[in-house]
Image: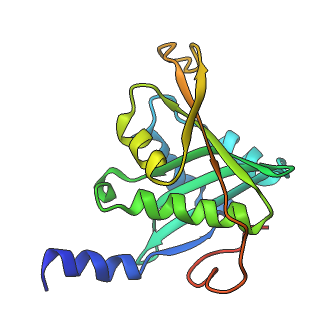
Amino acid sequence: MTEAESLIAQEAELVFRLMKLTDIPDILIIEREAFTMPWTEEAFRNELTHNHFAKYMVMELAGHIIGYAGMWAIVDEAHVTNIALLEAYRGRKWGERLLEELMKTASYVGMKSITLEVRVSNEVAQNLYRKKGFRSAGTRKGYYSDNREDALIMWADLPEYEEHGHMEGSVELK
């Protein structure tokens, strides 16, 4: 099997499901690897137990969490709170798959648009977001508290949810 065939086979084995409290230790490993200002265990615990706007999913491969994504679903707008993959699994377009699942889920729960902030220096992420239909809508000056870097605000319209073809291999986030 070639490397490309192996990646395709692995991608077919990706599972997306709701994040549970017991997932938090694995999520914290991803957080610390991906972000200069990682969220704490308490932050995730609060999101999962007290924030009724919060929707979080994990991406698993062979039973191991390799990525996660979260959003707040408020009225008809989804706000991406975080999206991250373990470094060992980057460069396979799986971050794109994770974003796609989050966007499908947002549409499924009735969201019409989706927004996020991204560091102005993070061109890799910005390119992914543009590929998925996000467009720049301004900046937030000094948004990131670690170095006062500005954030680019990006928005995308979401297609209306269609019953057919969705949720195979996906999760319904309630």
As drawn, the residue found furthest toward the left would be: 2
Relative horizontal placement of residue 8, taking residue 27 as reference (left or right)? left
Relative horizontal placement of residue 133, taking residue 32 as reference (left or right)? right
Q: How many marks?
A: 0
Q: Quadrant of residue 126?
A: top left
User: What residue is shown at x 49% (from left), y 43% (from top)?
Assistant: 31
Q: Quadrant of the C terminus?
A: bottom right
**Image spot of residue 2 (x, y percent):** 12, 80
Pick whichever, 34 or 6, lies toward us. Answer: 6
Q: Quadrant of residue 125?
A: top left
**165 w.r.t. 89: above or below:** below
**Image spot of residue 26 (x, y percent):** 50, 56
Query: Can residue 30 be spotted in the picture?
Result: no
User: What residue is shown at x 53% (from left), y 63% (from top)?
Assistant: 100
Q: Quadrant of the N terminus?
A: bottom left
**Image spot of residue 112 (x, y percent):** 75, 55
**5 w.r.t. 31: above or below:** below
Query: Can residue 62 be spotted in the picture?
Result: yes
User: What residue is shown at x 53% (from left), y 53% (from top)?
Assistant: 27
User: What residue is shown at x 72% (from left), y 48% (from top)?
Assistant: 45
Relative horizontal placement of residue 54, taking residue 104 as reference (left or right)? right
Identify the colour scheme used. Answer: rainbow
**Image spot of residue 172 (x, y percent):** 71, 73
